[in-house]
């Protein structure tokens, strides 16, 4: 694979890879480092990339594995990356609504972080990155039926936890 083909196949997915890395690492700088490392690994393997059915699926798998390795090798240093949601709409919303959205966003991020890794990955790929079930199948190696079940359970768990927390807080 030459430079032009690499640019056409790999570089368009780097936004998705970055968001995936940030999902796992919860730190912008760590996610940028992970993305850079994955891109370097792909570049060094560029001669073998043509043998893969989906270079994007390979890149996603490499990113996931690298992030999990990073999380295992050192303590998970998290930063508060949840301010993004409220900062976009800060000019048009009342302070009360901004605080409410920020709290909801923080709660959802915390609930999603507590999901098992497989549920977290599939939920992210399907609902955030908007991958098709077939693309998720390539990345994870699971069947479409298994992906649907895992996704359903992840969504149900997020919904139940969110409603339980809000109902509990409303009781006071």
Image: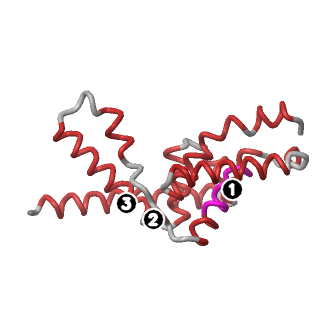
Horizontal placement of 115 versus 140: left or right? left
Label 3: how many Cα within 10 Å (few below 14, some 14–19, many 20+): few
Task: Pinpoint residue 53: horizontal percent, then vertical percent.
Answer: 81, 47
Q: Nearer the viewer, residue 98 or 158?
A: 98
What is the CA distance from the residue labelled 3 to the residue labelled 1?
Answer: 24 Å
**Circle 1 sits in a helix, a strand or a loop, which is it?**
helix
In percent of width and height, residue 104 lies at: 28, 50
Distance, label 2 to label 3, CA atoms, is 9 Å
Task: Say whether marks 2 and 3 touch (CB < 8 Å).
Answer: no
Which numbered disc covers residue 46?
none
> Most prominent secondary structure in the magenta stretch?
helix
Q: Earlier in the sequence, mark 3 or mark 1?
A: 1
Q: Which residue is mark 1?
A: 61
Say if the magenta span includes residue 65. Answer: yes
The residue lying at 65 percent from left, 49 percent from top is 35
The residue drawn where x is 87% and y is 44% is 50
Q: Secondary structure at mark 3?
A: helix
Determine if the magenta segment contains residue 7.
no
Which part of the image, by quadrant, shows the C terminus? bottom left
Q: Secondary structure at mark 2?
A: loop
Q: Is residue 22 above or below residue 153?
A: above
Chain part drawn in magenta: 58-67
The first of marks 2 and 3 along the sequence is 3
Quadrant of residue 78 in the image? bottom left
Nearer to us in this view, 19 or 156: 19
Classify the position of the N terminus by image quarter: top right
Residue visible at 41% across and 50% down in the picture: 81
Task: State whether residue 72 is above or below residue 14.
Answer: below
User: Which dot marks residue 115?
Assistant: 2
Residue 110 numbered mark, or none: 3
Q: Are marks 3 and 1 in contact (CB under 8 Å)?
A: no
Instruction: Give the residue displayed 89% in from the left and 49% down from the top.
Output: 48
């Amino acid at each position: 694979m030459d430079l032009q083909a690499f640019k056409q196949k790999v570089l368009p997915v780097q936004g998705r890879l970055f968001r995936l890395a940030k999902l796992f690492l919860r730190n912008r700088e760590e996610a940028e480092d992970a993305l850079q490392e994955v891109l370097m690994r792909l570049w060094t393997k560029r001669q073998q990339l043509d043998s893969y059915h989906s270079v994007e699926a390979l890149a996603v798998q490499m990113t996931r594995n690298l992030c999990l390795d990073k999380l295992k090798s050192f303590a998970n240093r998290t930063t508060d990356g949840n301010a993004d949601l409220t900062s976009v709409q800060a000019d048009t919303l009342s302070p009360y609504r901004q605080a409410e959205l920020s709290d909801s966003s923080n709660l959802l991020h915390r609930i999603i972080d507590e999901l098992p890794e497989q549920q977290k990955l599939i939920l992210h790929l399907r609902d955030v990155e908007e991958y098709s079930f077939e693309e998720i199948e390539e990345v994870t190696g699971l069947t479409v039926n298994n992906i649907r079940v895992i996704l359903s359970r992840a969504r149900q768990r997020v919904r139940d936890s969110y409603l339980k927390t809000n109902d509990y807080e409303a009781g006071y």
